[in-house]
Image (cartoon, rainbow, N blue to C red):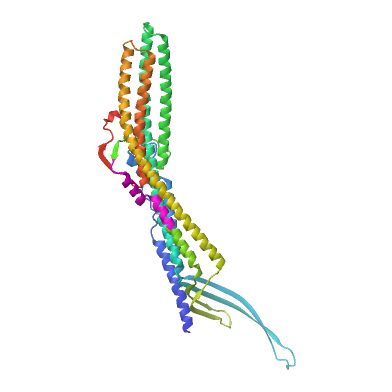
Amino acid sequence: MKINRIAVILCLLALTINAAFAIQDLKQPKKNKTKTEQQVYTNEIHSVLSLDDCVKIAIENNPVISASIYDEEVYKSKIGQAWANYFPSISAGADISRSGTKYTHLKNLPLPYSRLYNTIGYIPNVSADMLLFDFGKTKASADSVKNLYQASKENTKENINTIIYGIKSTYYNILFAQAQVKVYEDTVKDYQLQLEQAKGFYKFGTKPKIDVVTAEYNLGKAQLNLVKAKNVLEVAQVQLSKIMGIPEYKNYELSDKLLLNRYDITEEDAINNALEMRPELLSAEKTAKAAKMNLRAARRQFTPDLGAYGSYGNGLGNAYDMRSMQVGIGLKYTGLNLVNIKKQVNQARAEFNKSQAEYKSVKDEVYLNVKKNYIDLQTAAESIVIAKLALDQAEEQYRQVTGRYKAGVGNAIELKDGENTYLNARLDFYNAMLNYNVTAASLEKEIGVPLVMLEEKVLNLNPEDI
């Protein structure tokens, strides 16, 4: 009778524990169901966006980040699945049976006599098993998944870093494209003026007709370059909208200019910070730890499981009640296959060695990229100063040849050379500024954290100079 009660209590306890945790999980608020109200971006609404605005919009709307966050939830759920081995496992059912037994009288009776006794039985049953200890197999598996979960969180940070770099790079490219459009618009105006001057000189016979033809050609080429520059600008805006996660939105303008800030970081600090904080490297490290825990779990498959079990059944609906009950604690192997376990250990060891090599590869790649980007940033800063000096010289040369042509002492070839030199110098200067800002953004991505700006500038410029 005591065994009967213990079996029933054990089964009810197992059912209660499972139900309690299931209800608790259902009552937990779902993070992704109640989404913070976000601004809706439609082309009926005009926006002026700074670089920080674009970054915030991308973090809220870019689907890559959302997918990465859901990936975190997947691994978080797997941690609970691993620890669930220590929770009771319940089985329940009901058997319906029909049986017949033939009874025959003794042989010394004068006439044989027999009868068929039919019974119908309803036999409900419930059983429960609970793992008490498995020599660390469950813990090792849970630790492995926990490290993968932490790696997924670092992957999310890395995706955010990549998207921020994409935003900054595209944002700066749009600013460069706008400057390029402005350069070609100025060039078109200059060539229109030069064409009018050439026609005037030709009309009064002071210049040959070749000057008019040359001016018309220069104007047509400048107009073509302007069309191409506007197309580049439009494509860059579409790219920015796509990275922000609002690809159809285009009714906005950018509020910033190409910046020339200096940054408070040395090469040694950049490398050390990257090795400590770069999410991609931390993710590779966590993945290697997960592989190590997986190897530990595989090795412990050779050990048995210590568990408690209990079952209870009670036959109803017939003359013969069929009651059964069972309670116990024991060690057991389930599906033990030594060859298969050995091969699983070999696989886990190979995966661990692979993860170690991949971590070393990522570490070397981070070191190389940080060092390269730091050197490129210093070179880009120097290039801006040189490009500005060349621009000032080209502008002075263009002013002189333009004055000579207006005075009637210059020629069209001299004027065209001066115009091309000035045009290329302006584009080279803006390109140097673009390269500096994109390289700084790339260095931030490789380190994994924003750079600290100094008050000192690479080059002090007035807003109208940019």
Position of 172 relative to 185 (above/below): below
Find residue 18 and report its horizontal and vertical position in percent.
44, 68
Which of the 4 image quarters holds residue 429?
top left
Find residue 146 and report its horizontal and vertical position in percent.
41, 60
Position of 179 relative to 274 (above/below): above
Q: Nearer the viewer, residue 315 or 68?
A: 68
Image position of 358 (left or right of 465): right
Q: Nearer the viewer, residue 196 or 315?
A: 196
Position of 189 relative to 71 (above/below): above
Q: Which of 3 and 229 is in front in this view?
A: 229
Q: Is residue 311 visible?
A: yes
Q: In percent of the image, x 54 and y 75: which residue is there?
A: 124
Find residue 363 and report its horizontal and vertical position in percent.
40, 50
Find residue 407 and report its horizontal and vertical position in percent.
31, 11
Q: In percent of the image, x 58 and y 83: which residue is there?
A: 320
Query: Magenta segment, which residues?
Result: 263-288
Q: Residue furthest right?
A: 110
* 268 part of magenta stretch: yes
Q: Which secondary structure type mostly characterizes the magenta part of the structure?
A: helix
* 458 part of magenta stretch: no
* Quadrant of the drawing holding the C terminus: top left
Which of the 4 image quarters holds residue 176?
top left
Position of 284 relative to 224 (above/below): below
Q: In percent of the image, x 39 and y 62: which residue is there?
A: 27
